[in-house]
Image (cartoon, helix red, strand yellow):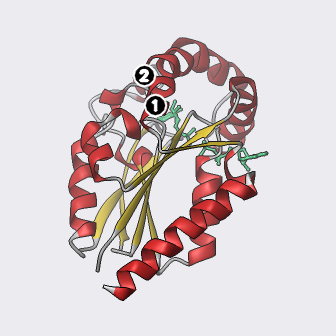
Amino acid sequence: MKTIIIGIAGGTGSGKTTLTEKLRDHFGANEVSVLNHDSYYKRHDELPYEERCKLNYDHPDSFDTPLMVAHLRELRAGHPVQVPVYDYTIHNRSDKTVTVQPAPVIIVEGILIFDSPELCDLMDMKVFVDTDADVRILRRIVRDVKERGRTLDSVVNQYLTTVKPMHEQFVEPSKRKADLIVPEGGHNLVALELLIKWVDNHLHAVEAE
Ligand SMILES: Nc1ncnc2c1ncn2[C@@H]1O[C@H](COP(=O)(O)OP(=O)(O)O)[C@@H](O)[C@H]1O
Ligand SMILES: Nc1ccn([C@@H]2O[C@H](COP(=O)(O)O)[C@@H](O)[C@H]2O)c(=O)n1
C-alpha cells in the first residue's frame, strides 16, 4: 500500500483539527489515520505540577519529534504504532497509548511540524491554516478554560510569555514551507474541496498501480 502523508500546520486555534476532522469524515477512518504532534510532548515526571505549568510548550524542543518520525516510517511501512496519550490538564503524558493503524492517507497535525526538516521530508503535501492572531487567542481562551482545565489568567499569561513569541519565532516563518495556505481552516469549503480532489487523485493513482 502506498501511503500519502499530509501535514496540517498553523498557529494554536487556527482550525487545524477542524480541517483534519473534515477530511477524515469525508474519507472515513479506514482511509485516513491521524497523528497529532501534541501526542509527542515530552514526559516531565521529574517536575511537580506547579513547575510543569511554567514550561514552554511552544518551542520545538518540547516535543519528542524523533519518536513521531519513527512512527510515521512504521505506518508508511504498513505497521500499526502505539501513540502516547497526552493529558493537557496535568501538563504531562498519561500512562495510556492508542493504536494508530496504517492507512492510505496519514494526516500529521501540529503547530510546529513544518519546523522539523525530518517531518517535512516525509510529507507529500504541506498545508498551513492561516488565521488572524486575535481570532486564535479568543478561540484558545474558550477551549483551554472549557476543555483543558485552565483559568483565564493562566491562558493570558501563557499566551504573552511563550505562545505568542514562539509563534512569531517558529510557527509563522514555517508557513513558507507550505504547498497550500488555507485561510480560516476547516470552514474554507473551497480549500476543503481542493484537498479532497487532490487526495482522491492520489488514491486512484495508487489503485491503478
Ligand atoms: N473557520 C472557523 N470559524 C469559526 N470557528 C472555527 C473555525 N475553525 C475552527 N473553529 C473553532 O475554533 C476552535 C479551535 O479550532 P481547532 O480546529 O481546534 O484549532 P487548532 O486545532 O488549530 O488548535 C474550535 O472550537 C473550532 O470549532
Ligand atoms: N501542557 C501543555 C501542552 C501544550 N499546550 C499548548 O497547546 C498548544 C498546541 O495545541 P493546539 O491544539 O492549540 O494547536 C500550544 O500552543 C501549547 O501552548 C499547553 O497549553 N499545555
Q: Position of residue 133 (x, y in %)?
A: 68, 24
Q: Is residue 35 above or below residue 52?
A: below
Q: Position of residue 169 (x, y in %)?
A: 45, 17
Quadrant in which residue 56 is drawn: top left
Q: Position of residue 64 (x, y in %)?
A: 27, 41
Q: Is residue 201 above or below residue 82?
A: below
Front-lying residue, 34 or 162? 34
Q: Is residue 174 left or right of residue 3?
A: right
What number is the disc on residue 56? 2
Front-lying residue, 150 or 194? 194
Going by the numbered disc 1, the residue's amino acid type is: Arg
- How many labels were placed on the picture? 2
Which comes sooner in the sequence, label 1 or label 2? 2
Q: Is residue 77 above or below residue 39?
A: below
Looking at the rendered image, the quarter that the C terminus falls into is bottom left
Front-lying residue, 173 or 84? 173
